[in-house]
Every structure is written in structure tokens, then in C-alpha cells.
Amino acid sequence: MRNPCDKRGTNRGAWSKEEDRKLIDYIRLHGEGCWRSLPKAAGLLRCGESCRLRWINYLRPDMKRGNFKDDEADLIIKLHALLGNRWSLIAGRLPGRTDNEVKNYWNSHLRKKLKSMGVDPDNHRLTQKAPLLRSRSSHSASLSTDAVTSHENMKCNSTVLPDLNLDLTICTPSSLEGQRLERTATPTLLLFR
């Protein structure tokens, strides 16, 4: 199998400011187009994959820089409960964030935060020993203690989060109105309203 970045004469190290400028200028004039032919047309000694990744992960004008906001963190937790470790799908719902950036934030911050709240980060359910939350400052306020206490009372309540079905059950409109299905599994922890 041929690896396009194995060609002799292509740079494989860090990108220079001049290379970044060439890539930005070319894409502004011609659009993203065909990544395989872009390096030669832009006058870069790089492979197409390297140009594509540099643009997507670092140079795009709509890239968000800096810390994640509380609403972004909340959305990542909700989407992770729904989609699992499908980082590109999750990042697609967070404009300006890359899949790698979202994955790193999950592993370095959110996973630990859920564990400290007594929530299993893999299945988003309460663990047997749920520790008490000590403070409700900053982001802890959005990860509400009310969610832990109301966990036992929660059933298939579509009015709380109608757009996200974290239990991955399929409910038809008629079943939501008249009939409620009894569940044997523990419902997913509702962390946000």
C-alpha cells in the first residue's frame, strides 16, 4: 500500500510560517478542492494529507481557540452518552472544535469530573458509591446535585430532553402520549436541564 507522504522531497517536519501562508492563500483563492493536487499547485513540498490536516486542525478561520465553555462541556457529555467515543460525530456538533481536541478534553477533564461525581464515564450511570458533591462553584453548578437526587425518580420522561434520547430507546409519538413502557434497566443519569 502506498503512503502519499513517503515520497522523496516532501517535508515531514514542523510547518513554517511561510508554508502556512502559502496554504492559507491558496485555499482562500481556490477553495479546499482536491487535497492530492493542492500541494503542487500551492508550491508546497508537502503531501496532500499533511496539507489537509494542517488546514483542518490549525489554520481554518472558524477554529475556536482556548478553553471549552460550560455549554460545550455539557454538550460533549450528552453526546458521549448518546454516541460513545465517536469523536468526529461529537465534534461535528461543536463548531470550530476538532475531533482530536474534543477527545483530549474528554480524557483530561470531563472523564475525571464524572468519576468524581460518582458517574461511570463509560456508560453514564451512577456507580454504587456516589460521592457527595462538596461545592457548586463554576462548572459544578451545571453538573447539578439535583440530577443525582432525582435519578431514582427518573423514567422515560421525554419532556426533559426531547431532542436527546440517552437510553437509545425508540419511542413513537403514540407511545409517548398514552402508554409508558416499564423498564428493568437503570435509566441514564440526567445531568442537565
Image (cartoon, rainbow, N blue to C red):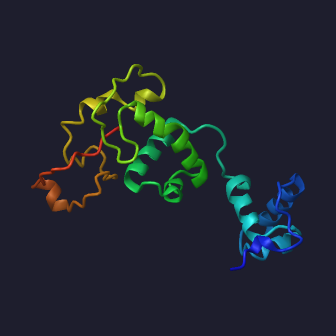
Residue at 77%, 65% (x, y): give it: 27
Q: Which image quadrant for residue 55?
A: bottom right
Specify whether 80 is left or right of 105: left
Residue at 86%, 64% (x, y): give it: 11
Nearest the viewer among 72 and 2 is: 2
Position above or below: 35 against 69: below
Nearest the viewer among 96 and 151 is: 151
Residue at 43%, 44% (x, y): give it: 77
> Farthest residue toward the top?
134
Quadrant in the picture for the C terminus? top left
Q: Residue 186: horizontal and vertical position, in percent?
A: 22, 45
Position above or below: 60 against 157: below
Q: Residue 60: horizontal and vertical position, in percent?
A: 70, 55
Residue at 48%, 25% (x, y): give it: 138
Kindly tell me whether residue 19 is visible in this rendering.
Answer: yes
> Farthest residue toward the left?
178
Q: Which image quadrant for residue 23?
A: bottom right
Specify whether 119 is left or right of 29: left
Nearest the viewer among 81 and 174 is: 81
Quadrant in the picture for the N terminus? bottom right
Total marks drawn? 0
Q: Residue 120: horizontal and vertical position, in percent?
A: 36, 41
